[in-house]
Image: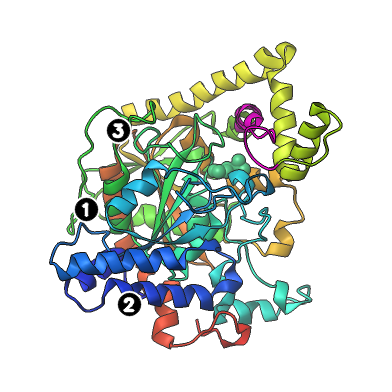
Amino acid sequence: MLGLSLREAAVALRRGQVSPTELCQKCLSFIKETTILNAYITVTEDIALKQAEEAEKRFSRGQPLGELDGIPIAIKDNFSTTGIETTCASRMLQGYIPPYNATVVQKLLDQGAVLMGKTNLDEFAMGSGSTDSIFGPVKNPWSYSKRYREKRAHCRHVAEEDSDWVITGGSSGGSAAAVSAGTCYAALGSDTGGSTRNPASHCGVVGLKPTYGLISRHGLIPLVNSMDVPGILTRCVDDAATVLGVLAGHDPKDSTTIQDHFEPFKLPDVIDVSKLCIGIPKEYHAPGLSTETLSLWSKAADLLEDAGAKVIEVSLPHTAYSIVCYHVLCTSEVASNMARFDGLEYGHRSDIDDSTEAMYAATRRQGFNDVVRGRILSGNFFLLKQNYEHYFLKAQKVRRLIAEDFVKVFSSGVDVLLTPTTLGDAVPYLEFIQEDNRTRSAQEDVFTQCANMAGLPAVTVPVGLSSRGLPLGLQFIGRGFSEQQLLTIAKWLEKQMDFGALEFYKVIENGGIPQLHSKSASSL
Ligand code: GLN
């Protein structure tokens, strides 16, 4: 059962081949077997079993709610969940129990989804490795494949076997690992600069960043309000479309959501790409792009061309400014967003009470990690009266130019852009932590960040394994609100590249092994 897609699991439930409780118990026991991954901050076992029991009653009455009824899902721990601790992986919010559900969480529960738990992330979603969490880093399930282990055994510089694992990417690494390892059928992430697509690509799952405004942000604890979107992580493109159908649409609690009615869609089984024009942005041949990623990218372009699509090179000239521009805009919004965590209204409060100022300072020093504090400082600097125009306003203008690059390309007849998702496969943890958080984001987010600047939809699809046995993904970026077309093309590529046979959880189940907690027993 753990090897099925969400759709297949939904069919199995309908046919009575498995009950919601059995499915839930299977996922719960697999969560326990894979605790080494550190994918979950909170496992909501009792809630999940109760929800599964309710789903069971609906099934026995012959009245399941929809496709998500009885389906185990996980939620990144920066979405508010009624009565369930929501930490943002930060000491600042440890122990915080929200009194309300994020709109997206409520929508999933209204459809009968079973909540397995809250997943690990970089503190306040600031990062690209899921390594900067007060609960410790998330480990990539693929680190435990036999193939990866054998390759790494030849690397002499890895002294300690226990630290020989690769990052999941981030910041939604817990959600990506949870889906990849087979502990749930879909998970929510968030995506501000790539945080859904980056870990999805490193963990071999599908990651969708919808158009800004298509899905409500109400209850998603903000990082950069003008760029944040809830992201969807699933095992296949069809499943991403299913979850999107449940989540998308206007929310009176988020004024930036679309006013129009959103019509859920199913993706066709027979897909014709011959009338499409696919753009290959030349600026995405970035320094550091691995030869393996490059060759998969070319292979995908060739496949599209062979199928009759027009594949052309395009230019997005302002791409190179994206990272630095993001840094200014992100930190400026962070400085403003984080002001609420002052120990009085929200969050942890220090017991230092010499003065209000001393209490504030101690609260924020104790509550936030270096990354968050660093961003608050940078942001406040950029927002100073004498700096505002030179930094903040200039970055806003550059952001506009980046967005206009896309408008020009799409209005010239290009339907969708094909790019890599990341430079290469996931790096070992010990290598990753040599760099500071900002440098890491600059490397990890080069191909993902522009879509957030422009508010465009983008999806990553797993397309192959690197020579080290780690997943690689490719990304499609589409016009605003073109999710149906975007996911249709993504599904086409998914079929052609046939990553399915390699999926981690399938091999686990077919091999009948490997207890992830016993390092030596991996079978991939
Ligand atoms: N890596 C980027 C950052 O650290 C993006 C994070 C995200 O998308 N949440 O800000």
Residue, disc 2 = 22
Q: Eyeballing the image, is 15 above or below 446? A: below
Asked if the residue under mark 1 is in contact with the one under mark 2, i.e. CB atoms within 8 Å, the reply is no
The mark that comes first in sequence, 3 or 2, is: 2
The span picked out in magenta is 326-348
Q: Report the disc number at residue 267.
A: 1
Q: CA distance from mark 3 to mark 1?
A: 22 Å
Please state the horizontal and vertical placement of residue 125, each as a whole percent of the image: 58, 45
Mark 2 or mark 1, whichever is nearer to me: 2
Residue, disc 3 = 250
Q: Secondary structure at mark 2?
A: helix
Mark 3 or mark 2, whichever is nearer to me: 2
Q: Residue furthest left?
A: 62
Q: Amino acid at mark 3?
A: His
Horizontal arrangement in the rendering, residue 425 relative to residue 111 (left or right): right
Please state the horizontal and vertical placement of residue 238, each as a whole percent of the image: 28, 57
Q: Is residue 21 visible?
A: yes
Horizontal arrangement in the rendering, residue 66 relative to residue 352 (left or right): left
**Callout 3: few (<14), some (14-19), or many (20+) C-alpha neighbours within 10 Å?**
some
